Image (cartoon, coloured by chain):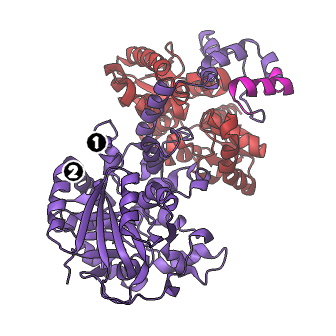
Chain colours: A red, B purple
């Protein structure tokens, strides 16, 4: 494992939830890993979903080139958005295949997956302070289908005091901008109902999920506070620092 | 006496003999590996795909040797329905099985041609109480815990019919999609939901077997394995799909028995309806499908779409229906990718759905609304530059209504919040150092 990683932040961490990106930088710093942030565009999945494969290809090729160049010395690539991760790892490949695309597909990790790998290798700084929270964890479809289901929960459970009361793996019905569209809105709400009921019944302090779209859907139906797991993990480090200082 | 190939009905064994049946299947008393079943199944299906033309030819020759079978080919639903209409004479009562070919592709045409179509097994639920239905189905099938995690084979050959009946027959036609058929000797395999298939094979005046050309396998062993696998992987989805609709209930038991010496007739239709096209136009992996509907169990939209069509739903059937033209172009998929997770033959349905969508938009163009939502990054840049004003604006009623009108984004949608300082700005600013 190298001391540098390439970070693909995508639109979500860049524009809508900069805190998740900042948290990742801070987490990796505490593990002596430097982050490289190359030029990048939207991963292209929204364009694919809106029937614009040409636009998606343009973005995808650009990202593949920039990421491959940055990761060329042998660095891993990490993302903090499940859909970007899926797009770069496999969704784009059948349509926009290239040498660069295959190269990045082979070395891309979801941030939770990467950090938990550090832990399994005994390399993770585990100086976590206590976060006394009861949380509901929602596993986004785009992590689930990449077989990343247990890892985020295992990572959260490293945080002292944090209790993962309920883990949900059903779809929230949002699907990026799918559920926002008028033609799908009603269907999206029907799908979400089960998840909303589960969240309400779980009686927790907050919900945790990696996906921005899932987060919006969960908050919209229940009013619950939704947190990215990286933010929680970084908070635990900050609490750990405070404990040490005391 | 007419001679016919064997008609084999496969059904779950009762609870008490589950483990014995498991032993019969794997030839030893132990649980079987899900992966080895998948591997074998994939091989069988790939053979059926690569040799389809020769298998069709072989099966036609094989069936030609049975004087009790009349065979025909239908290139589409219209041809199949017209053949069925012709051989049914004046009989308009049709019992159908819940095969996707019969329900999705033939039923509308049969009804238009004047047939009353009924799903025979609904008669099994004469005493069923509303709300307790699910439990009753589970009781009937004595639900073995087989799916993936804990694979114990409990499907067994339950009924074998080797000659047609000349007594006890009733005045209706049975139109049944077969689950698999052996090209080598013509043996036909069905996975039975209830006792419906067995009864139809024994009682219908005319038995019409609809053989989707992808259902032709090399020999009996392959066909049986294919049929059992359908039960293993699709059991839960099939159970969830057995919800009775009054409109499809009919009391076949009350039909009087026919007198006379004509006995039953057995017809086999080789049915294409775009299937051979799949082999050429980049969708050939759909040809590997065993129609188990395992993918349906994972699909978030499945329970909410095409309810009016009463179709046998699965993401694969949705895609196939779009390609065949009886469903609108694939637009309601939310691209979660979950369907692929369950597929026992690893069909990459998500990629095929993307492909179908791209082809559709390339041909028919895109709506302005779709174009407006094309570039979320541009929207985010604009919103970010004008934050927090933009966050205040998007909450205004008039802005919501205009957004809905121009972009198709629902007025009640919660939009993500814009930030003046992006992650990149922060990172470049060096404050993380």
Q: Position of residue B18 (x, y in %)?
A: 37, 80
| Residue closer to the observer: B212 or A50 | B212
Neighbour class for label 2 at 10 Å: few (<14), some, many (≥20)?
many
The residue labelled by disc 2 is B52
In magenta stretch: residue B382: no
| Residue at the outermost right position | B397
Instruction: Please report contact status of discs 2 and 1: CB closer than 8 Å, yes or no.
Output: yes
Please tell me whether residue B112 is drawn above or below residue A55 in the rendered image: below
- Whether B159 is drawn above or below B313: the answer is below
Q: Position of residue B57 (x, y in %)?
A: 16, 55
Circle 1 sits on which residue? B279
The magenta stretch spans residue B399: yes
Q: Residue B159 lies in what quarter of the image? A: bottom left
Q: Are marks 2 and 1 on the same chain?
A: yes
Disc 1: CA contacts within 10 A as few (<14), some (14-19) or many (>=20): some
Residue B386: which quarter of the image?
A: top right
- Look at the image and tell me whether residue B232 can be seen: no
Residue B25 x %, y %? 26, 73
Residue plotted at (60% across, 52% down): A167
Residue numbers of the magenta segment: B393-410
Residue at figure coordinates x 65%, y 49% from the top left: A191
Horizontal arrangement in the rendering, residue B235 relative to residue A141 (left or right):
left
Residue B420's disc number: none
Q: Secondary structure at mark 1?
A: loop
Left or right of B15? Residue B399 is right
Chain-order first, disc 2 or disc 1: 2
Query: Is B284 rendered above or below residue B122?
Result: above
């Amino acid at each position: 494992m190298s001391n540098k990683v390439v970070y693909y932040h995508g639109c979500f961490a860049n524009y809508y939830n900069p805190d998740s990106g900042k948290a990742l930088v801070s987490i990796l710093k505490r593990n002596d890993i430097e982050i490289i942030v190359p030029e990048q565009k939207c991963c292209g999945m929204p364009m694919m979903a809106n029937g614009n494969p040409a636009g998606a290809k343009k973005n995808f090729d650009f990202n593949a080139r920039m990421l491959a160049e940055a990761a060329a010395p042998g660095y891993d690539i990490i993302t903090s958005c499940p859909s970007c991760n899926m797009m770069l790892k496999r969704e784009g490949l059948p349509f926009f295949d290239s040498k660069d695309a295959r190269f990045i597909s082979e070395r891309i990790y979801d941030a939770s997956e990467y950090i938990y790998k550090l832990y399994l290798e005994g390399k993770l700084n585990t100086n976590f302070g206590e976060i006394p929270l009861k949380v509901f964890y929602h596993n986004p479809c785009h992590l689930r289908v990449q077989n990343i289901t247990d890892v985020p929960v295992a990572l959260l459970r490293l945080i002292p005091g944090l209790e993962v009361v309920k883990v949900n793996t059903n779809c929230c019905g949002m699907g990026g901008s799918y559920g926002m569209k008028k033609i799908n809105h009603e269907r999206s709400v029907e799908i979400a109902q089960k998840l909303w009921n589960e969240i309400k019944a779980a009686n927790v302090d907050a919900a945790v999920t990696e996906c921005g779209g899932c987060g919006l859907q969960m908050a919209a139906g229940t009013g619950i506070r939704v947190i990215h797991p990286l933010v929680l993990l970084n908070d635990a480090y900050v609490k750990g620092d405070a404990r040490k200082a005391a | 006496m007419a001679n016919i190939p064997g008609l084999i009905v496969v059904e779950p064994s009762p609870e008490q003999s589950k483990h014995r049946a498991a032993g019969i299947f794997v030839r030893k008393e132990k649980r079987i590996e899900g992966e080895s079943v998948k591997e074998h199944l994939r091989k069988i299906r790939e053979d059926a795909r690569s040799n389809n033309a020769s298998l069709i030819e072989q099966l036609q020759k094989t069936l030609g040797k049975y004087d009790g079978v009349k065979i025909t080919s239908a290139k589409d639903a219209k041809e199949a329905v017209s053949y069925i209409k012709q051989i049914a004479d004046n009989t308009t009562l049709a019992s159908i099985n819940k095969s996707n070919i019969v329900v999705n592709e033939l039923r509308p045409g049969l009804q238009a041609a004047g047939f009353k179509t009924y799903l025979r097994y609904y008669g099994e639920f004469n005493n069923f109480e509303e709300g307790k239905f699910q439990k009753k189905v589970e009781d009937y099938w004595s639900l073995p815990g087989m799916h993936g995690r804990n694979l114990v084979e409990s499907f067994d050959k339950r009924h074998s019919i080797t000659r047609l009946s000349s007594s006890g027959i009733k005045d209706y036609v049975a139109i049944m999609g077969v689950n698999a058929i052996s090209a080598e000797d013509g043996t036909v395999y069905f996975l039975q939901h209830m006792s419906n298939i067995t009864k139809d094979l024994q009682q219908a005046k005319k038995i019409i077997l609809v053989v989707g050309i992808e259902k032709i396998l090399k020999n009996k062993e392959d066909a049986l394995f294919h049929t059992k696998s359908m039960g293993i992987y699709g059991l839960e989805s099939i159970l969830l799909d057995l919800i009775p609709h009054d409109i499809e209930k009919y009391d076949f038991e009350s039909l009087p028995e026919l007198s006379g010496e004509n006995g039953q007739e057995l017809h086999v239709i080789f049915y294409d309806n775009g299937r051979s096209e799949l082999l050429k136009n980049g969708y050939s992996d759909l040809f590997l499908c065993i129609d188990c509907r395992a993918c349906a169990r994972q699909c978030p939209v499945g329970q909410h779409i095409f309810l009016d069509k009463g179709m046998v739903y699965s993401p694969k059937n949705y895609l196939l229906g779009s390609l065949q033209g009886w469903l609108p172009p694939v637009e309601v998929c939310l691209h979660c990718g979950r369907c692929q997770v369950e597929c026992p033959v690893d069909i990459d349905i998500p990629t095929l759905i993307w492909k179908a969508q791209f082809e559709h938009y390339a041909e028919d163009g895109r709506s302005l609304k779709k174009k407006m939502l094309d570039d979320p990054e541009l929207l985010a840049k604009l919103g970010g530059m004008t934050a927090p004003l933009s966050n205040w604006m998007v909450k205004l009623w008039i802005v919501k209504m205009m957004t809905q009108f121009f972009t198709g984004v629902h007025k009640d949608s919660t939009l993500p919040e814009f930030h003046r300082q992006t992650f990149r700005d922060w990172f470049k600013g060096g404050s993380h150092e």
